[in-house]
Image: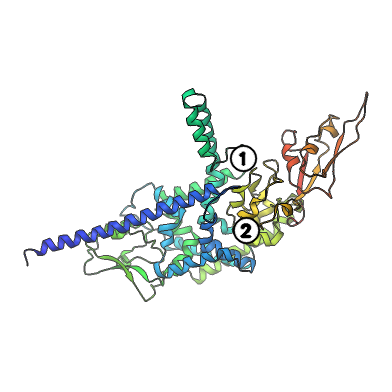
Amino acid sequence: MIENLPRRRSVAKGRRRQRVFTWVRLRRLVQVLSLLLFLYLLLATKRGGVTYLPHDLFFRLDPLAALTPMIAGRQWVAPLALGLSIPILALLLGRFWCGWLCPLGTLIDWTRLRRRPRRDERDLPPAWRGLKHAVLLTILLAALLGNLTLLFLDPVTLVFRSATVAVLPPLAALVGRIDEALYRIGPLQGTAEQLDSIARRGLPLDQPVVWQAAIALAAMILSVFALNAVRTRFWCRYVCPLGAGLGLVSKIAWLRQSVDATACSSCALCAGACPTGAISERRGFVADPAECTLCMNCLQACHRGAISFHGHLTPAPWESYDPSRRAALGAIGALAVGAGLIAVAPRVLSDATGPIRPPGAGGDDFLDRCIRCGECMKVCPTRGLQPSLSFSDIGGFLTPALVPRTGYCDFSCNACGYACPTGALPPLSLDKKQRAVLGTAHIDQSRCRPWSQNVDCMVCQEMCPLTDKAILLEGGGKGVGKRAKRPRVVTDRCIGCGTCEYHCPVQGKAAIRVRRLGRGNGV
């Protein structure tokens, strides 16, 4: 019996390690499948696209993106109710969303510059971890006041919007160049046609894509990945508001990490393997459940079998970086400053210079429910919907705005309302959408060729999609000294679709431009 004891211990240790590797592999598999599903829905979200699953599934599962529009809009949004299931599951499993399902968390894991944290890597001061709680509190307080500006920091909206604006267009341009190069080679023309057919299913190849906020959003997402060089999973540790909320719920989660003090040798391998710095020697190498993402790295790193995950019925202790009165006062102060800027900005610039909203967007109701996800921009066939960066629209930062010089509102399209996950843009029938007034076109006579140069030009009148044209040509004559026909906008008919501005042949700023109508777009 005594002679077989080392062998039995070796067998037991082997079985334990096999179970550990099974859980680690399972997590990685779930991460891959979750990210592939996110990418599939991202690429399939387009006008006329079929996803077989809700195209906005990840936004429905996102508790922050689900809860804040309901708080700001003071109404229940049924499709978003699914997001409330994640905090409920967090009561059982802790921050599993961050380590298993979050697409941004998975990308951060795969793009870190070091495979593992350094064993001697020290955490930043506790106040840094409190930053994400301050961001979360500010978002919730702002939602109570009907403002969702800071929701652009939500991880799901951040990665979807960044992919739509800063990743897919350059990728489409690259694929287009490769396709053209292959097509010039006779034997490879068939391959080029297949590549084009596959790419058109998810990439915007039909027309050049211009995103005014591409550089800003590319810099934002790249900075998230670059901060891995400072600390592994820097975003998840110190900034992510969704992680902060799920972390607070995880304080009383049932499944948590535990350490057998009698088996632990204090080697600190588990602390070095933890990507979020949740394990501290001060706590006896027990992970703070509010910071633990259930990655299982500590389980894999421990060679003595001292670490396990099992049920707990008592809450975890409160840490110095958890929300405090100081954090609440800081969030209230930041909110007051932000509210002052939002209130002042519209007075600096006239209302007419503000953004042109998509069809059906109605003033404050739109801002109360828009989560800056980019779904409507993704399905816009002309790429006329752009993330707003206007100073006069601070309260609507990164919300969709029509930029007619980039793309017009297609008269035959009503996809944006059906793509919106929160109802900020209502799903209008095509007939109702075609009667939605976005603004009114105005002619700059100093730039218009018929007015300033007495040259015939009727592009704006020809391109107007209305049956009863909103642009008429008046005047004209024959013989020497004739006067060119001059366009005039019939304001009672104009819906502000921007088709005329987009097609205006004048270089630079168009001679005919659309201005918004007051606060929002009527139907």
Return the residue found at the far bottom. Answer: 314
x and y percent of residue 129 in the render? 44, 62
Quarter where residue 312 is shown: bottom left
Residue behind mark 1 = 210
Residue behind mark 2 = 370
Locate residue 88 relative to residue 452 in the image: left or right.
Answer: left
Where does the C terminus fall, quadrant-wise?
bottom right
Residue at coordinates 30% horizontally, 54% vertically from top-left?
Answer: 119
Element at label 1: loop
Locate residue 412 relative to residue 372 in the image: left or right.
Answer: right
Give 415 or 453, whichever is nearer the viewer: 415
Answer yes or no: do the residues labelled 2 and 1 have beta carbons within 8 Å?
A: no
Q: CA distance from mark 2 to mark 1?
A: 22 Å
Where does the N terminus fall, quadrant-wise?
bottom left
What's the amino acid at mark 1?
A: Val
Residue at coordinates 85% horizontally, 46% vertically from top-left?
Answer: 490
For label 2, the crowd category at 10 Å Cα-Cα, with few meaning under 14, some 14 to 19 and many 20 or more, is many
x and y percent of residue 497 in the render? 74, 46
x and y percent of residue 350 in the render? 76, 52
Dot placed on the residue nearer the N-terminal end, 2 or 1: 1
Q: Is residue 171 visible?
A: no
Give 140 or 332, whichever is nearer the viewer: 140
Relative height, residue 454 to residue 419 (above, below): above
Relative height, residue 463 to residue 3 (above, below): above
Give 129 or 275, whichever is nearer the viewer: 275
What's the amino acid at mark 2?
A: Cys
